[in-house]
Image (cartoon, rainbow, N blue to C red):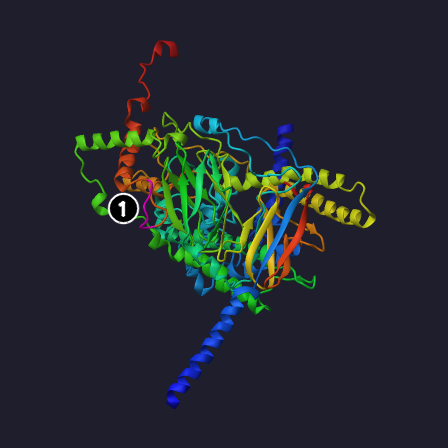
Amino acid sequence: MIQTICHFLISVVVTMVLIGQAGGLMAADWGTLSGRVVLDGQAPESQPIKPAKDQFCMTAGPPNETLMVGEDGGLANVVIYIRVKRGQSLEVHPDYDPQLSEEVVLDNKGCQFVPHIALIRTGQPLVVRNSDPTGHNTNASLAKNGAFNVLIAANQSQKMTLSKAESLPLPVQCNVHPFMKGYMLVRDDPYMTVTDETGAFEISKIPAGNHEFQFWQERIGYLKNCKYEGGELNRRGRVKLDIQGGADLDLGKIEVPASLIK
Amino acid sequence: MTKHHLTSKSIALVTVLLIVGGCGPPEQVFFQSNMREMVSNQIAPKYQQEIANVNEALFGTPDEPSVMPEMKLDIKQLQFAAGPVWDDQQGGSHGLYRKHCAHCHGINGDGRGPTAQFLNPYPRDYRPAIFKFKSTYNPARPTTEDLHRVLMNGIPGTAMPSFSLLPPAEVAALVEYVKYLSMRGQMETSLIGYVFDELGEGDDGERISLNPVNDAEQREVILGELLADIVAGWEEAPEQVIDPDPDAIPADKTAEQLALSVDKGRVLFYGTKANCIKCHGPTGLGDGQQDDYNVWNKAVVTFEEATAALPGQIKTTKASMRDKDQDQKKAIKKELAALNQSLALHKRVQEELLPPRNAIPRNLRQGTFRGGRRPLDIYRKVYTGIAGTPMPGGGPVTPGAKGTLSDEEIWQLVDYVRSLPFEPASQPTRLRINYDVLN
């Protein structure tokens, strides 16, 4: 009898502790970062891509995606991610768990890489596909994972996984069509994003605490010393921010001077 | 008279050179920093020096190499290959690298020796540790045997000769030294990345110096991570060798079987699956896509583009000064000064780089295969591509995965490629020489 009561009490305590932890997981400990990256000044004229030699690509007429500026200056394709100190890792919200088995597709479509910037978690399946009737190759200049350069025949694909995080988005190229350029960012955690065509971005379910966020764009590199209301990125385009549990930290407009564009 | 004058002048000059150069104490030789990497990563001069110091502590100098046990390099062999050229009393050679390699590949192994600018292709820059002619998967390091094979055979169609007449111990020492220069170059780039990414100004605005002697954390990163990664890459190379399935290797084909395989290979070559024609051209002469670069030349192109963009950045920065208040103007002026300084640096470094050249796909009708003409050599090229170049691989990215081309298809391509130099179109027409016209 006494034993049973004891067992009961223990299980109650254990359950309470578990509930307490789960409750903590649910709302209070995860926050969101959002904002909008805008270009301040006149963007240099974008050079159109002229695919020569390949009739299919000439007809497809892929756009130059190296610098995409929206009507009101919104800067697309800016990559934002959390920098983790060497040897440390971030706690990941369980909602992101299914992501690990979801395929990231890097498509060769209309003689451009879709998406232009692929975000991949280590261990996540990466499918390099060619949806074009013409042959492509995908040459990824990865650093920690080792570069790969594979032939992808028309309407075929190759599946792989990458095991190491990279510290920067790295270029992806097609050598058959050297005008095709894309990027790939490989991280251990899901806390990375790319700004949309209005320059807006959001990273959600970030573990509460102080994190260093990195801002990068392919024609600029690190968004050096860019200002937003109430703060500034440092000379490496990084900023340390306090993410509060259950709250959305909106940085507002992050202004990028046009002089940073290379 | 003038001639005589000149001669006495040159005798005087030679005498002066002998006194200065020949008879004085030997000048010490140091490794030069990879300024292209330093400048493109905006490494400040103080950090440049610190990076050079750390790398020298790890690898020594061209005269006195040093290694750590974890590098798994043979110091005896390195000492044999390093240093100035001299012969001992038994007639043994010393300073092998400078004797045989440095005039093309440079003291640093940067492929920028004095002869380099006259060669096409340029000599290899060992520092990124990317080698084209090897037996391993595309991203992997070469094996010791791969480097050895290149030294023994030379590289047909290039200025790289065979060193097979050297005593085996000398060839082995040179292979070890090439690995050493590679690791050293990799370490330099890793240190540049480490400084760029993680050092600089701390939260308090103080500069964090690169000083692993006093900083245990830095020491752990440099030895435990950066160096360990580099060494592991070299150590793992033998596991990364591409060995074709022995059952799939077509041995002793009959003439009919070979002809059939060549035909299938031809279809693949010109089709959209293997797509060889896109670069090697509809004629196989290498006259397809010629606008691309290999990684070594691409690095120079990228650097030149950055240099070319700077004046525009300076102009827009200047223009942004209008209608700004005093404080903002001050900040912009500081930025301008930095940009101008960067431009000057870029220009200075660029002067020393070799003008970039496009990667021209191989003319397959000549029968000259730089990576070796054995079926196995060509198989590996088609399977995994050629590291550092636009040539992609048709096989799987990693062992065990499924590639675009099957093993059988790769062998068919090998047969076709090997048959190309013997096609009638590859053979020059033999014209009868009209000696009357010549005389």
Above/below status of B210 relative to B242: below
Judged by its main secondary structure, the magenta piece is loop
In percent of the image, x 63 and y 36: which residue is there? B8
Taking B181 as reference, is B340 left or right? right
Q: Position of residue B120 (x, y in %)?
A: 47, 34
Residue B108, placed above or below residue B199: above
What is the x, y in percent for residue B199? Answer: 61, 59
Quarter of the picture containing the C terminus of chain B is: top left
In the image: residue A160, left or right of residue B198: left
Q: Nearer the viewer, residue B137 or A194?
A: A194
Per the image, is B364 magenta? no
Mark 1 belongs to which amino acid?
Answer: Pro
Q: Quadrant of residue A231?
A: bottom right
Asked if residue B400 is among those painted magenta in the image, a careful observer would answer: yes
Q: Is residue B371 visible?
A: yes
**Which residue has dot 1 on it?**
B244
Give the x, y percent position of residue A96.
47, 57
Closer-to-camera residue (A258/A241): A241
Q: Position of residue B263 (x, y in %)?
A: 25, 29
Q: Secondary structure at mark 1?
A: loop
Q: Which residues are magenta?
A: B399-404
